[in-house]
Image (cartoon, grey):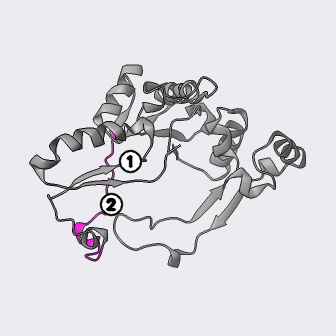
Amino acid sequence: DSFRYMVDGGYRRLNILKAALTGSIFKVRSYDINPSFLSKKKGMLNDVDFIVKAPYIYQFLTRNYSILPRFLMKRIAASNKVDLVIVAAPSTLRSSDVGQAKLGHFIHDAMPFELVEAPPDNDTPSRFAKQFYTACNESDILFTNSQDTKDKVLAVNKDANVSVVYGTPSSKPSEIAGSSILERKNLKPGKYLLFASTLEKRKNVETLLEAYSLIIDEIDMPLVLVGGAGY
C-alpha cells in the first residue's frame, strides 16, 4: 500500500514523524488467504496461505532510505519463516537484511542511469545506480528479463548468480481469448509489429516512430504500441 493511502496527507516528513512516534510505521499486517479466491489454472498464483503487508517498505526503498526496510524485512522473514525474499526491482536491500532467508532481485534494465535525461535537480539516475550496484553485489540470486541486462549485471559482478526469465501473457496460447483486442483491431498473427513498454522519453519511442516511418511502405504492417505512461 502506498503511504498516501495509509496516512492522511501522504508521504510528508510530518506524517512520517507522526507514524514513527505512534508506532504505526512499524506495524506489519498479516492476512490469511481464502483458497477459493485463487486461480486453479497452470502458471497462475494458486498456492498461497497468507500475505504479509508492510505498507511503507516500498516508499522508503525507492528513496534509498534503507534503515526501516532492513529492520522490517528481517523481522518479517524471521517471524514468518520465509525462505526466499524476491524484490521486484533493484533496491539497497542486502542478503544480510533478510536474516536466514535468501534474497533475490529482479532487474529489468539499467536505463535510468544509462540514458540520463533527468534535470539536474532530479536524483533518479544516481539513486537507481546505487540500487542497481547494490542488487548486483548483495543478492543471493538475480533475475533479468533479457540477455542484455544479464550481461550488464555480470559486468558489475562477474560471479553473480543471475538467470534470464522472459515474461509471457499466458502459460498456454489457448488461454488467450479469441475476442481479444487483436481481433477487435483486426491484427493478424505475423502481420503487425509490437512494441510493449511504458511510453516515456527514456524508452526512445521517438526514434522507433522515425524508423517505422522509413519502412512502412515496404513492409505494410501496422506498428502497435502497448503500454501506459512511465515515470
Q: Are the residues at dot 1 and dot 2 in contact (C-beta closer than 8 Å)?
A: no
* Residue at image point 28% right, 77% down: 179
**Number of numbered discs present?**
2
Q: Which residue is more in the foreground, 27 or 128? A: 128
Q: Is residue 62 visible?
A: yes
Q: Residue at x 16, y 62 (%)?
A: 189
Which of the 4 quarters of the picture holds residue 7?
bottom right
Q: Is residue 200 above or below residue 27?
A: above
Give the label on residue 10, or none.
none
Tell whether 20 sits left or right of 45. right
Q: Kindly indicate the quadrant of the structure image that contains residue 157.
A: top left
Inter-mark Cα distance, 1 to 2: 14 Å
Q: On the picture, is 166 further left or further right than 228?
A: left
Q: Nearer the viewer, residue 155 or 230?
A: 230
In the image, what residue type sits under mark 2? Answer: Pro
226 within the magenta span: no
Residue 166, magenta (yes or no): yes
Three-letter residue code for mark 1:
Ser
User: Given this view, does label 1 or label 2 mark the residue nearer the observer?
Assistant: 1
Q: Which residue is mark 1?
A: 197
Left or right of 35 in this view: 197: left
Give percent across and percent down for residue 187: 21, 65
Residue 109: % across, % down: 41, 35
The residue lying at 77 percent from left, 52 percent from top is: 27
Residue 142 appears in the picture as rendered: no
Q: Which residues are magenta?
A: 164-179
* Label 2 SS: loop
Figure quadrant of the N terminus: bottom right
- Which residue was labeled with disc 2? 169
Residue 102 image position (x, y, % from top left) = 51, 39
